[in-house]
Image (cartoon, rainbow, N blue to C red):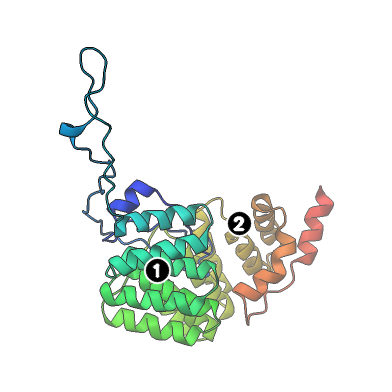
Amino acid sequence: MKGFIVTALLCVAAFGGYGCATTTCNETGAKAAPVASKETATATKEDSAVKIDVASADKTDASGGKKDSEPAKEEKPKTAEYYFTEGLMAINHGNLNKAEKNLLEALRMKPESVNARLYLARVYERKRQFMSAIQEYTVAAGYAPKDARAVVGMMNNYLDMGAPKEAVISGEKAIERGVNEGAVRDTLGWSYYLLGELDKAEDNFLKAAKLTTQDTAPLNNLGLVYFEKGRYEDAMARFEEARKLNPKSQLAPYFIALARNKMGQEDKATEALKDALAQDKDLQSKTGSYKKEFFPRADTGDLTPLFEKIKAEK
């Protein structure tokens, strides 16, 4: 659900601020992933070099003999930044228990670190400990009330728990305190969509589309709302916009095929379905799960005859 690609040097610099989170964007926009904040941290990387007293360092005289014995190296104490970086490296290697241990130690030493809390929350997400993740996102939001990453992370965990009402509450509270980023609006819209409150879903998706003009998620999601409302032409238009933004989209052409099929445009629906199959040859086997995920209430129609027609043409 969420990406964990990190770069250690950048993340050390971002430990106390906002600039280190990475994101993944759901191509369909079914749920928005946490967004990285536009703010950047100004903290500097801790110098990891070992300091040695030059005056007492090992020296050799002209005859080649040593004057002094080699001094013991002085080790610097481990810092919160050290544990933060160790936690991120553990995430990269898939060692979630080690990541959790190091991030907890970083937070013990520096509890106000928003990034450490966000990554700890994501570790809990990976371990499917959703309430623990929500707790960390909540604390992070307390330190950074307008950080959209904490809000979206919290909402997505509620959605993963099958609790869209709680996701709505979190999203609406964030909007009230001025967190009006596209990902928050999109995730709030999706929460309303799951609840069947289509007008509120449409309103939030429209606002998300204006805030994130290069994101296909709110466009696809708007199309799903219009599809359920029976506004197939409007739905198709939104799906087409999404495909234009992302020509390699696997789902937009499938959604277009569904809309055109509902409009009785079999030939155009077949062409759209061919485009979808060109992006995902296993599409037909996934249509059942897509129906459950994207169309929880709507009648999508039956594309089986079109799938068979395409197979017969080969």
| Res 176 → quadrant | bottom left
User: Badge 2 is on which residue?
Assistant: 250
**Dot 2 alpha-carbon crowd within 10 angstroms: few under 14, some 14 to 19, many 20 or more:** many
**Dot 1 alpha-carbon crowd within 10 angstroms: few under 14, some 14 to 19, many 20 or more:** many
Foreground pick, 44 / 188: 44
Q: Position of residue 10 (x, y in %)?
A: 33, 49
| Res 101 → quadrant | bottom left
Report the residue at 50% width, 70% height from top: 125
Of circles 2 and 1, the one toward us is 1
Asked whether residue 103 is in view, the answer is: yes
Report the residue at 42% width, 71% height from top: 153
- Return the residue found at the far top: 63
Report the residue at 78% width, 54% height from top: 310
Judge from the rendering whether residue 225 lies leftward or rightward of residue 289; answer left or right: left
- Return the residue found at the far left: 55
Asked whether residue 211 is in view, the answer is: no
What is the three-letter code of the residue carrying label 1? Ala
**Vertical position of residue 78 compared to residue 197: above or below:** above
User: Badge 1 is on which residue?
Assistant: 183
Judge from the rendering whether residue 115 lies leftward or rightward of residue 299; answer left or right: left
Q: Which mark is residue 60?
A: none
**Vertical position of residue 210 compared to residue 13: above or below:** below
**Vertical position of residue 277 compared to residue 28: above or below:** above
Foreground pick, 303 / 6: 6
Upstream in sequence: badge 2 or badge 1: 1
| Res 206 → quadrant | bottom left
Q: Position of residue 73 (x, y in %)?
A: 28, 41
Report the residue at 56% width, 50% height from top: 248
What is the three-letter code of the residue carrying label 2? Gln
Q: Position of residue 39 (x, y in %)?
A: 25, 59
Judge from the rendering whether residue 307 lies leftward or rightward of residue 10; answer left or right: right
